[in-house]
Image (cartoon, grey):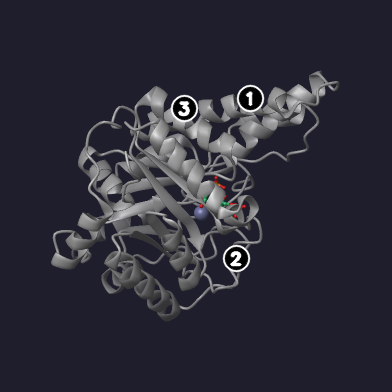
Amino acid sequence: MPLVSMRQLLDEAAKGGYGVGAFNVNDMEQIQAIMEAAKETNSPVIIQASRGARQFAQDRYLYHLILAASELYPEIPIAMHQDHGNSFETCKSAIELGFTSVMMDGSLKEDGKTPATFEENVEVTKRVVDYAHERGITVEGEIGVLGGVEDGHGAGGSGLEHITDPDQAVEFAERTGVDALAIAIGTSHGAYKFTKKPDGSVLKMDVLIAIHKRLPNTHLVMHGSSSVPKDLQDIVNQYGGKLKPTWGVPVEEIQLGIRNGVRKINVDTDNRLAMTGAIRKVLWESPEKFDPRDYMKPAREAMKKVVAQRMREFGQAGHGGDYKPISIEEIAKGYKNGTLSTRPLVASK
Ligand code: G3H
Ligand code: 13P
Ligand code: ZN
């Protein structure tokens, strides 16, 4: 199956009332882990690469590895997504390379650190939407700012500093025409999100629900959605790691989000923890080993297990064969003739 538009994948998820995990990749083993999990659970998939990942791997490698995945698993719909694009140029280069979806994260300035103004965010996001839709490519925007810093990207601080304002979310969706909207509800990137199991004072599910009420048909995106499970932390620490106690986003909160318009859930940290724990275990228990396959194989297996579990928990499992891909050219026509709407339905307060 050719790579599919993320818009199609999310529209189908909305029809089916489920969420789709978007998993970050940097190398072949991570792509393999996701595809094996998708095959086992019969799931559609979103594979995403950050700017850091594109630089680390050289993005052309990642593109061709994902194309290989689409050849090896022709029954599985795959959307290839740019995670946290920091500028029009980053998104344009992803589209030129063959990504079927981009995130223009205009919540931050191009440095990926300083919060942008609302008007700056609208302007750059709209520019990307115009360019991308003409070519049939999906766009995710972000309103509000997440906490934390990953690989130099992020405003830092806690997730509570720039929670999304529902009125701004409505205006942003109306003025930009994004296909999917990432919102800030208190989560952060990375392992250190919460100092105890989060409650409503730090994880603002009420804000998410308020936004969904105003934008009932808009596909919402939860970033920073790793659950940072204790068992994965424990494996890392048991074999020489030094993670401090921490909490992530409980899966039941994500499921509440999915019942309230969340269609895309970004997960990276849980897979990083799973792979690192598995590698540490091998090297700790068998220090004489030096063949990378001896630790990359268990690492890949550990990531596959986490991804398959999330696919079941998000509800995408079983939906891999629901639909035929619409070509990117047809999607572009749909944006042009209005069959694919870019005007959000807005409910009154
Ligand atoms: O946005 C956060 C993702 O976890 C990607 O992180 O920029 O370190 O690749 P990265
Ligand atoms: P985590 O760090 O919680 O896995 O979040 C990943 C993410 O949001 C990627 O964009
Ligand atoms: Zn993110």
Residue at 30 percent across and 38 percent down: it is 18
Residue at 81 percent across and 19 percent down: it is 286
Q: Where on the picture, by quarter, is residue 27?
A: top right
Determine the CA span between mark 2 and mark 1. Answer: 35 Å
Please give the label number shown on residue 155. Answer: 2
Q: Is the residue marked by circle 2 packed among few (<14), some (14-19), or many (20+) residues within 10 Å?
A: many
Residue at 14 percent across and 64 percent down: it is 338
Query: Does residue 163 show up?
Result: yes
Residue type at the position of mark 3? Glu
Label 3 vs label 2, nearer the camera: 3
Q: Is the residue marked by circle 3 packed among few (<14), some (14-19), or many (20+) residues within 10 Å?
A: many
Is residue 275 shown above or below 121?
A: above
Please name the residue that numbered disc 1 is placed on. Answer: 297
Q: Where on the picture, by quarter, is residue 208?
A: bottom left
The one of 134 and 244 positioned closer to us in this rendering: 134
Residue 166 appears left or right of 57: left
